[in-house]
Image (cartoon, rainbow, N blue to C red):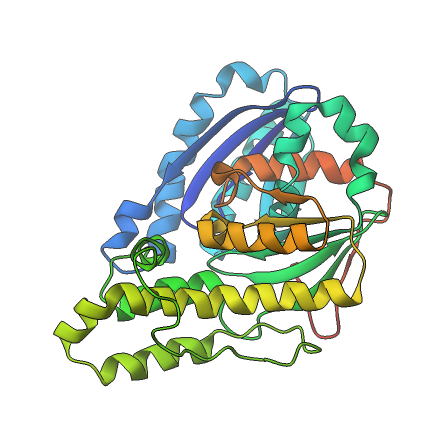
Amino acid sequence: MILAIESSCDESALAFFEPKAGLRRELISSQAATHERFGGVVPDLASRMHLSALPLLLEDFRDELAQVNQIAVTRGPGLLPCLSMGISLARAIALATGKPIVGVNHLRAHVHSAFIELHAQDPHHFLAHRKNLLPHLGLVVSGGNTLCVKLDKDGSLTVLARTVDDAAGEAFDKGAKLLGLPYPGGALIEKYAQNGQAHSFHFPRAVPDHTDWRFSFSGLKTALRYQLEKMADTEVQQALPDICASYQEAILGQLLAKVEAILKVEKFASIGLSGGVANNLSLRQKLKECAQSNRLPLLIAKPQHCGDNAGMIAFAAWAEHHLPPQQNITPAPQLTIDCP
């Protein structure tokens, strides 16, 4: 029985996981409305809000605490002031209960989150047959990270592709800010894009070489800024759906191009999609078509497990203990998702 704590950014979250039943309870306290006024997350403010929210969430788990065998907590990557709040709570619970703590890498948890729903449907079947889904190609797309990883049969994670500058989620949010849309603006770009034409504006796709699996989105934001500087405010408002559709297409096109390039070189038994941007319906549809063309099953994290959440922390803590012993991340040259 695992009690999990997540506090890496602006979501305070707790979850209780039982291996035979899956996630029994999950609670999240969001700070989005507070940080919207500042156009982004303010770390010191976020940490103070964690300090207030986490004890209140824990109070709702009072009945489950007696059943807990292990405490799982996000150890990074994330905002240091925010991470410290969750780790401090985990240590306090461990001192009070005598239960052990396990630190979970936030990005590893995102990779495993694509399997949560499959486990929930039939835990026994999942344990018996999950090796049939490995090696697994996971695409993790969030506000702070964009990477493709290989989850192998021995439990190891290898980073295959990673952004060299900004994450796709950041490109969405910063692009929305340039367009005058409120934070977080990624969902609003998707909303406007539904009524726009994706080829109305030309935005560059960095690293076009299919043999180079790096992502890059900083130049895309610059291209959007230059395009908007050429237009009057009224023109921007009239063309907003087309701008959003074209901008979104440039982001998603780069993501899909790298996935398809990797699939041509390496063999996988399944594909996964996770991270906050995984809620983008266009991305889900495009990756579904990619998986179908390669005759591979597609596992997509449920919406509540795409953003920062404690459910994926609990599941990853359990899943990695039930995989074979080799648990090290094997990074590509100069790439790593681990943290101290």
In the image, residue 58 sits, relative to residue 11, either above or below, namely: above
Left or right, residue 145 beside residue 270: left
Asked if one can make out residue 76 in the rendered structure from this viewpoint, the answer is no
Residue 229 sits in quarter:
bottom left
In the image, residue 122 sits, relative to residue 332, either above or below, namely: above
x 63%, y 34%: residue: 116
From the top left corner, tell me how far across and down residue 197 is, in percent: 34, 66
Asked if one can make out residue 328 in the rendered structure from this viewpoint, the answer is yes
- Rendered-image quadrant of the C terminus: bottom right
- From the viewer's side, name the closer residue of 306 and 68: 306
Give the mark count: 0
In the image, residue 114 sits, relative to residue 330, either above or below, namely: above
From the top left corner, tell me how far across and down residue 66 is, in percent: 60, 15
From the top left corner, tell me how far across and down residue 90 is, in percent: 57, 36
From the top left corner, tell me how far across and down residue 47 is, in percent: 40, 49
- Rendered-image quadrant of the N terminus: top right
Left or right, residue 115 beside residue 266: left
x 55%, y 33%: residue: 92
In the image, residue 340 sits, relative to residue 6, either above or below, namely: below
x 77%, y 25%: residue: 125
**Can you name the residue that lies furthest to the left here?**
234
